[in-house]
Image (cartoon, helix red, strand yellow):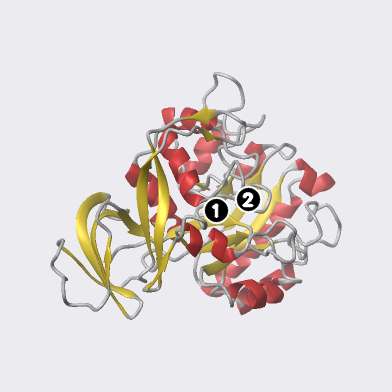
Amino acid sequence: MVIGGGLLVDPEKGTSSAGDIAVRDGRIAAVVEPGSADGLYAEFFDAHGLLVTPGLIDLHAHVYDHATGLGVAADLAGVRSGVTTVVDAGSSGSDNFADFERTVVAPSTTRVLSWLNISRHGLTRGTTELAGDDDIRSADSIRTILAHRDVIRGVKIRMSRSVVGENGLEPLRAAKRVTERIAAETGRPFPVMVHVGNAPPAFGDVLDLLGAGDVVTHAFHGKAGGLFPEAGSGPLPQARAALERGVRLDVGHGSASFAFDTMERALEYGIRPHTVSTDIHGRNLVGPVHDFTTTMTKLLAAGLTLNETVRAATSEAAESIGLAGRLGSLAVGSVADLALLDRVEDTTPLVDAEGRTRTTGHRLTAVATVRAGVTHRIRKADA
């Protein structure tokens, strides 16, 4: 198959240029000048006027749709929205991961990976999964991760007042002990993704426990006690120190966790999101999230460039889950996961989780998804 004539947005090179991509046996076989591959392959996808990017990776989604009450179908959040890989963020824990793998990972066309919840229940018993004395069974988490290491890419923990109850920082310390054990066993970095929200625990105290490769999701929320402790102040000192250690900031839009004001202020201080994600679930599909490309458009509206936004949606996300070079890439030999995006003229206001709006002249929409060399055209009813 040849995808011809599109504008190739290469996040690793930082370039945008016209070109053709030839695909064979599920991998990128060649990246050539426009028209160079004409007639060499039986199938041709005309991408003139479209952006062609590596397959989009949603680093924070909820797709355990039959077990949590929050989840959406993986393919709705995935290939039907231009996304080739979704990483479920803690919907399952050690008690139910086998069911998650059997009922969600295996049957989905979208590649489904996981941040295993440090709580043994995941989110199957509601949203106070770390308030009890027996919610964390570290030995069970370690066994589950080692048995499913290709799918489980890290550990998820939610560190906000309503979740941890009186347990404070101890659940995060337990999660860090698990990830350190897995890193030692596997010989590769194994990150923790930390949900931050309302204190306690304080955001700075959470950051102090994180190291290189760990991910803070909801990093740009507009709640009190976030990245900017006071009106008119600079960023939290612990945030600067965490970034210097290699801690990574993720958008994690969700229903209440992305604010234009916070993102724009962060950009003024030179702080950019490492990764873009939706925190998509059944309660925010109709807004404010909608889908992955709408979240990308919001980052453009906040001031990120197209190349920065695509990098955060592809190669940087792949790096966060230990798959750099295999996913999120247009390099020859990498998996042929691609997104074909249109820039549609649209002045409809974009709404953040605080109800504030921004307007741009264009909106990114997904036209087709190529997943391991197979093309999935997106109908308007899907988008």
How packed is label 1: few (under 14 Cα within 10 Å), some, or many (20 or more)? many
**Residue 198 visible in rendering:** yes
Task: Work out whether 338 lies above or below 266.
Answer: below
In the image, taking residue 287 as reference, residue 125 lies left or right, namely: right
Q: Position of residue 217 (x, y in %)?
A: 58, 47
How packed is label 2: few (under 14 Cα within 10 Å), some, or many (20 or more)? many
Q: Position of residue 144 (x, y in %)?
A: 67, 74
Query: Extreme top residue here?
Result: 232
Which residue sits at x=60%, y=76%? Answer: 148
Secondary structure beneath label 1: loop
Q: Position of residue 44 (x, y in %)?
A: 26, 70
Q: Nearer the viewer, residue 184 or 337?
A: 337
The residue under label 2 is which amino acid type? Val
Q: Position of residue 263 (x, y in %)?
A: 50, 33
In the image, taking residue 303 as reference, residue 165 lies left or right, namely: right
The residue under label 1 is which amino acid type? Asp
Which residue sits at x=47%, y=55%? Answer: 380
Q: Which quarter shows the N terminus?
A: bottom left
Q: Quadrant of residue 206?
A: top right
Task: Name the residue tied to disc 1.
Answer: 214
> Are the two marked residues, 2 and 1, in contact with CB atoms closer than 8 angstroms?
yes
Q: Quadrant of residue 335?
A: bottom left
Which residue sits at x=68%, y=64%? Answer: 65
- State the CA–CA distance, disc 2 to disc 1: 8 Å
**Residue 320 visible in rendering:** no
Secondary structure beneath label 2: strand
Task: Work out whether 107 lies above or below 86.
Answer: below
Q: Earlier in the sequence, mark 2 or mark 1?
A: 2
Q: Nearer the viewer, residue 74 or 231?
A: 74
Which residue sits at x=24%, y=79%? Answer: 42
Which mark identifies residue 194? 2
